[in-house]
Amino acid sequence: MDPRAERVAATRLFLLGVAGLLWAVVILLRLIQVQVVRHDYYAAEARAQHLRKVALPAPRGVIFDRNLRPLAMSRRRESVYLDPRHVPDPQQAAVLLADALGLDRAALLGRLERARAQRRGFLWIKRRISQEESERLRRLRQPWIRFEPELVREYPNGELAAHLVGAVGFDQQGSFGLEHSLERELGGRRGWARVLADVRNRPLETMEAADPEPGANVGLTIDERIQFVAERELKAAAEAEGCRAGSVVVMDPGNGELLAVASFPGFDPNQPPRNKDEERLRALNHAVSAPFEPGSVFKIVTVAAALETTRLRPETVIPCGNGRIALFGRVVRDHHPYSALSLADVLAKSSNIGAINIGYKVGEANLYEYVRRFGFGSRTGVPLPAESPGRVRPLSAWQKTSLASVAMGHELSANTLQLARAMAVIANGGLLVAPKLVRWRQSPGGPVQQEPSPAPVRVLKPETAILMRQLTEGVVLHGTGQAARLDGYSAGGKTGTAQIYDPVARKYTHLYNASFVGFTPVTSPALVVAVTLNGAKHYGGAVAAPVFRKIAQEALRLLNVPKDLPESPAPAPEEPVETNDLAIAELSAPPSEPAPEAAEVEGDAASGPLAEAGGAAPDFQGKPMRVVLRQALAAGLLVEPVGSGVARAQFPPPGAPLRSGAKVRVVFGP
């Protein structure tokens, strides 16, 4: 071989040897760096690739009704995901998954291709699939289809009590209703686990874990059966009347327990909201979150305040101005041109001018005090988010006409629950009870703990409350609430109709907040039912009172309340029923007409025909209360009614001589 060629070959061999040695040194140094210098770091990185920390959701507590029927519960369901990088054929995968899960093929293929292009290692296909969908996917036997167990909140009754119970989001956090306000109790505490996974991220072994702590169970005062009836009748009436909203509250007046809280329109909490507007509407519980001017329902406060702070009695004659009264440049027209009515008939016939005259006798300070005593202007304290306290202006902000407006239920606002609480004062003997929604709570593995109730507050004297029961019964027997009569049960209540104000047009519309709030039976009330229809075309006595009748009749049967009247249908009224209780105000009326003076409304010693009464006592026996009061008013007699129904006895007896100003005590019964 040529010596020159040998030298070149030797040089190349030497250089190759040097290069190999240098490469070995580099590898050795790199191994030292990886295995010695940065051993801990790379060991941790390796563990991180095979160990992952997984959050373990806690099962939410069950929400029960008072009879232990579940209203909300958590169940385990599976969700489907995959690693787009390990899918062999995206197009075939889209076909298989779409057919098994009922998804759109083109949309799913687009998601898969975008994820592969972005080199993403995780893609949800469908969350919380059904058992049937899970079985269809498993029959495909595709290793790249993976399942993740998740908890899902289920509402077995669908729309029933949806506004009340609320719902949760995809994160299983309460979004509104009791699910939101009781989140700390219902939500529990999440756990975690460290899982060893293979190269395809499939779990092989659980290394360590902290178990989740389930949420507490909660028992409500709601009766699922009565809630169903309330929602059914509310929906039927609201749709028939074309109302935009409505609400019903059914309460036990003795302890404040809420047996039903219904809100219209409803929704199915098992289905997610379609948009933000629907989500906002779901969170609006009209029974507690949507105050309105109550209108004539509020006259129960005005009359109760009069019975306690003035000498006015049920038989006292109240001037009604032939249906018209002038107030500081404002004319209020009544729905009927009554010249005068007894105080009892002012409530029964819902005379606005009569209520105004009663309000002037009570006075601003006393009326404001009783408005606050009945709980208006303050929250009831139920554990529901966004409860409105309503609006009651402080006495210092009242204007010249405010006394008249408040006396007939205007210039203030209240929600349906507040109206039910106010009527419960009359039904239970004069006590303001706190509405109660949560009956008991039970932590996991712990005992059932009964929810305490605040002590009731006395608002009215017992005798005043009993007298108000009789007066409100007159509303149902011969007043604007005759459509609320029950079969086999006595009932009392009050209608209300208030025009809805349009802030854009700056005027009142011909749509109404129509209400009826009542209780039954009269002698021993077991239920208070408050009904409100927002955006009604007719008056409270015509559209809300029938809803009260249907709900109360069914609820009394479900609760096995004994009947207190003979088993017979409610009698037909002797004359056309007047359901109009709307006050009409003409703000442009001349200001020169005088405002009513307190002297226009006197107590027991009224001037006029009452002071001239004399002669023999008429025979009232066998006549309904309204007929007795009408005859007594025409004859100028003072009548002291006791009980309700028809006249069974009277003192002095028929034909007995009467002195001027004497009273006739009439005992009424079934």
Image (spheres, rainbow, N blue to C red):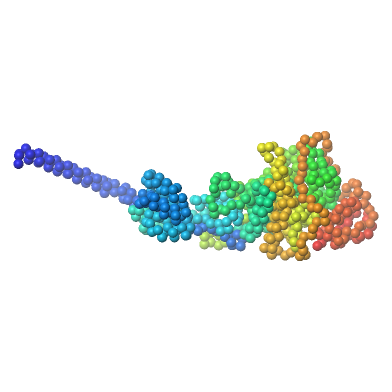
Q: Is residue 396 left or right of residue 317?
A: left
Residue drawn at point x = 77 percent, y = 48 percent: 580
Residues 434 and 260: in front is 260
Image location (x, y in percent) of residue 40: 31, 49
Residue drawn at point x = 27 percent, y = 47 percent: 34
Image location (x, y in percent) of residue 124: 43, 50
Image location (x, y in percent) of residue 366: 76, 45
Residue drawn at point x = 89 percent, y = 53 percent: 637
- Hey, which quadrant is residue 147 in on the image? bottom left
The vertical placement of 252 against 288, above or below, is below
Residues 254 and 566: in front is 566
Image location (x, y in percent) of residue 53: 40, 52
Q: Is residue 244 left or right of residue 309?
A: left
Q: Is residue 469 left or right of residue 82?
A: right
Q: Quadrant of the C terminus?
A: bottom right
Q: Is residue 365 left or right of residue 198?
A: right
Residue 42 appears in the picture as rendered? yes
Q: How many marks?
A: 0
- Hey, which quadrant is residue 62 in on the image? bottom right
Residue 192 appears in the picture as rendered? no
Residue drawn at point x = 22 percent, y = 45 percent: 27
Q: Quadrant of the N terminus?
A: top left
